[in-house]
Image: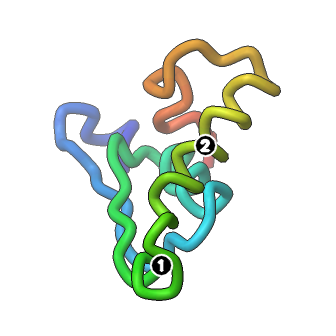
Amino acid sequence: MHRALPSVPLIGMGGIMTAEDAIEFILAGAGAVAIGTANFANPQAALHVIDGIVQYMSRHNIADVNDIVGGVIC
């Protein structure tokens, strides 16, 4: 979708509980993700997701999260 309509903003929603979940949405083309239900189980969920994304980027030498938006080739 991101490659077909790059000017249309995509927001990943639904089932984001971990950084890995968020990264999957970002790689699929989401420029933003929404964390909902995870906040009920853990009020710090968003902070953990952000930290996990930062760690992922560090491990893969990625300076800007925008560099991985739509990074999966289908």
Classify 10 Å Cα crowding around label 1: few (below 14), some (14-19), many (20 and above).
some
Q: Secondary structure at mark 1?
A: helix
Q: Position of residue 42 (x, y in %)?
A: 52, 77
Q: Quadrant of residue 18?
A: bottom right
* Residue that mark 1 sits on: 38
Q: Which mark is residue 2?
A: none
Local secondary structure at mark 2: helix
Name the amino acid type tagged 2. Answer: Asp
Callout 2 environment at 10 Å: few (<14), some (14 to 19), or many (20+)? few
Q: Nearer the viewer, residue 49 or 20?
A: 49
Q: Quadrant of residue 11?
A: bottom left
Classify residue 31 as left or right of residue 63: left
Give the camera-side residue of 6 and 50: 50
Q: Nearer the viewer, residue 73 or 39?
A: 39
Quarter occupied by residue 61: top right
Q: Earlier in the sequence, mark 2 or mark 1?
A: 1
Look at mark 2 in the image and give the residue it sits on.
Answer: 51
- Give above or below for 11 relative to 64: below
Please name the residue shown 49% across and 46% down the image.
26
Q: Is residue 34 left or right of residue 40?
A: left
| Residue nearest the observer in this picture, 73 or 53 | 53
Outermost residue to the front: 43
> Residue 72 placed where, x, y %?
62, 42
User: Is residue 32 depicted above or below 67 in this figure?
Assistant: below
Inter-mark Cα distance, 2 to 1: 15 Å
Looking at the image, which residue is at 39% across and 37% down?
3
Tell me the kind of residue under disc 1.
Ala
